[in-house]
Image: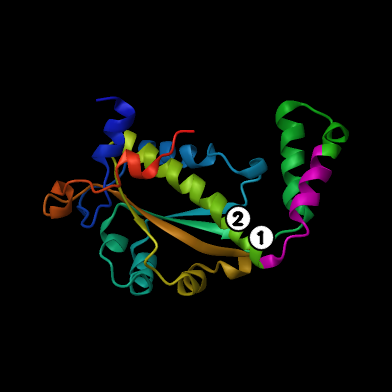
Amino acid sequence: MNTVLEHRTWRYATKKFDATKKVSNQDLETLMEAARLSASSYGLQPYHFFVISDPEIREQLKPASWGQSQITDASHIIVFANATDFGEELVDDYVSNVSETRSIPTEGLKGYADFMKSKLMELPTEHKSNWTARQAYIAFGNLMQAAAELKIDTCPMEGFESKKYNEILGLEDKNLNAAVVLAVGYRSEEDETQHYAKVRKSTEELFTLI
């Protein structure tokens, strides 16, 4: 089987992690770099990631996660937090980064900066938050696939109360919102779901070739 498809077939939403197995620092850094390198609209990366191993914090987050064991049993949990609002500084900071990274005078980037601002600054706050959350999900998918390539198990989790996460992690003060959570670690031998056949729609149902 093509290795691209092999990784996707191997991974599943791990329901029970082996709490004795931890992701190495080297592999964790690889996962973080995969998320950092993820695509985002205009390259603006309007999000922040919280990689949580602290057992006390995770015990606090568990009730806000419907009591799911992955929160405390996985090696780490990663909270993908999107910016709830932004101003021109989002574009200005990006342009400064481009200028420094590519040795381009900021004056030469003004036209592109003005274009981005014209498309983004007039959005209502709710639309801004929805847009930034979608960008966070792109990074979320990239990190999950990178984990599969390393044979590290994951469980994507939307079953949590974001407001309580925001309170526990102090996200509102940072203009952030918990969009989605990824538990990262290694499957327990007792997790029966690893043996289930993968259920997906057929190619014919999902694709139209034009």
Q: Could you tell me the amino acid type at mark 2?
A: Thr
Residue lying at 78% horizontally and 59% vertically, measured from the top left: 122
| Residue 90: % across, % down | 72, 51
Q: Farthest residue in the front direction?
A: 210
Residue 19 quadrant: bottom left
Do labels 2 and 1 touch, CB within 8 Å? yes
Q: Give the range drawn in magenta.
A: 112-125
124 in magenta: yes
Query: Disc 2 marks which residue?
Result: 132
Residue named by callout 1: 128
Picture quarter with the N terminus: top left
Q: Which residue is drawn at 53% across and 51% down?
A: 136
**Horizontal relation, residue 61 to residue 151: left or right:** right
Q: Tag 1: residue type?
A: Lys
Q: Where is residue 95 in the image (x, y as percent from the top left)?
A: 76, 40
The answer to whether 63 appears left or right of 18 in the picture is right
Does 110 appear above or below 137?
Answer: above
Q: Say which residue appears at 77% left-offset and 57% top-offset.
A: 121
